[in-house]
Amino acid sequence: MTKKPADPANGSAPAARQVPMRDFSRSLPMSLLRAREAVMRQFRPSLREHGLTEQQWRILRALASIEAAEVTELARTAFLLGPSLSRILRDLEARNLIERKTAKADQRRSMVSISREGLKLMASVAPTSEAIYAEITRRFGARKLAELQEMLGELERSLAGLGGADDTLADG
Amino acid sequence: MTKKPADPANGSAPAARQVPMRDFSRSLPMSLLRAREAVMRQFRPSLREHGLTEQQWRILRALASIEAAEVTELARTAFLLGPSLSRILRDLEARNLIERKTAKADQRRSMVSISREGLKLMASVAPTSEAIYAEITRRFGARKLAELQEMLGELERSLAGLGGADDTLADG
DNA sequence: GGGAAATGCTTAACATGTTAAGTGAATGCG
DNA sequence: CGCATTCACTTAACATGTTAAGCATTTCCC
């Protein structure tokens, strides 16, 4: 199998490269996607055993660290879009893992917090999760991991304010 | 509002950190997700104007560079799961952007290739796409970009063979 | 005060991610 | 040959991503 398509030294390229574009497999989005998938592949089975998806786990973690939050704030913290979060909160509430109550001062807002049961679930998942993270750190190297995170942060910052079209977000 | 929750210097932390775990916002999956989103945010509007999703674009690019491929090979190249690819190919075929024909030697396999119309569409999208990529490269720095991609590749390799549970993939 | 605009959240609609099951075709092997 | 197994791909079912509407509530401002 060891087949290497799109070899630039190919004397008679059999029809490839019909549109002028950089090599597909080396695009930044692909690199990021593949790397992330390699990481998440490690966590998914453990989460699944506890009946949690990656996003549900993100929400519980976010809630456990900030006590209570409005939906919009939670969306920003867990990096989820409003509609996704809305659905997930509905399900987590039905499973009694979170609690909601509308704010007194502003009927539009609802405060979300993790329930006692949610905390118990977290406590049962956290050890495995931390162990996996430790193994990843060990394999890749703690220093390199820190460097990588730094670069990812820089990339994010360098693209901030290059808004993707019609948006006027700019945030606060 | 420049609010910084989970401040470690907070004299009377109001209930946070109820489960022992590293800081949520600094997890590797989150960093990768945020970085990728920052990048994709740049491309999506342009793709959308041409009626393409990110994944559809990936498939067209993959096909344009390798001429024709079996579905499974295409899934690996475009980094998509079988079911996703199956759906997308159905739609792309209905839009006459790709062509399919079952292999003679093995009726199970189907060979997929990009159509003339698909190539035209690609040609109309590629310039904008390349320009966006160039701007990203300019902002972040070409050298740093190469470094980042190298690290991402290393991360992926260092986690290969740490299979996510019951799998016996190991591939070839 | 009162209506237009903004805000916070939810629903809707369509596309993909993820896992499991299904279908038809090819292979292995007794 | 016959049949269980494997293989390539598709369908199905549920969850999330993404964009656009919808619905209260609140704020702005005359």
Image (spheres, coloured by chain):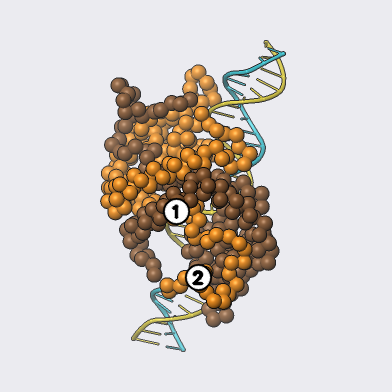
Chain colours: A orange, B brown, C yellow, D cyan
Residue B88 appears left or right of A92: right
Question: What secondary structure is found at the residue carrying circle 1?
Answer: helix
Residue B134 appears left or right of A55: right
Whole-percent x, y for residue A50 in the image: 35, 47
Q: Which chain carries label 2?
A: A
Query: What residue is pinned by disc 1?
Result: B146
Q: Distance between the residues labelled 2 and 1?
A: 20 Å
Query: Is residue A59 among what the camera can see?
Result: yes
Residue A141 appears left or right of B56: left
Is D19 located above or below residue B12 in the figure?
below
- How many residues crowd around disc 1 within 10 Å: few (fewer than 14), some, or many (20 or more)? some
Is A156 located above or below residue B12 in the figure?
below
Could you say which is closer to the camera, residue B112 or residue A113?
Answer: B112
Query: What residue is pinned by disc 2?
Result: A7
Whole-percent x, y for residue A99 in the image: 42, 31
Task: Kindly indicate the quadrant of the structure image that contains residue A55.
Answer: top left
Is A123 located above or below residue B126 in the figure?
above
Q: Residue at x 29, y 54 (%)?
A: A139
Question: What secondary structure is found at the residue carrying circle 2?
Answer: loop
Q: Residue at x 39, y 35 (%)?
A: A62
Quadrant containing the N terminus of chain A in the rendered view: bottom left
Whole-percent x, y for residue C6 in the image: 61, 25
Residue type at tag 1: Ala
Asked if both marks, 2 and 1, belong to the same chain, the answer given is no
Q: Which residue is drawn at 67% across and 57% down?
A: B124
Q: Which residue is drawn at 42% across and 51% down?
A: B148
- Labelled pair 2, 1 in contact (Cβ < 8 Å): no
Q: Which chain carries label 1?
A: B
Residue A48: mark in rendering: none
Task: Kindly indicate the quadrant of the structure image that contains residue B96.
Answer: bottom right
Residue type at tag 2: Asp
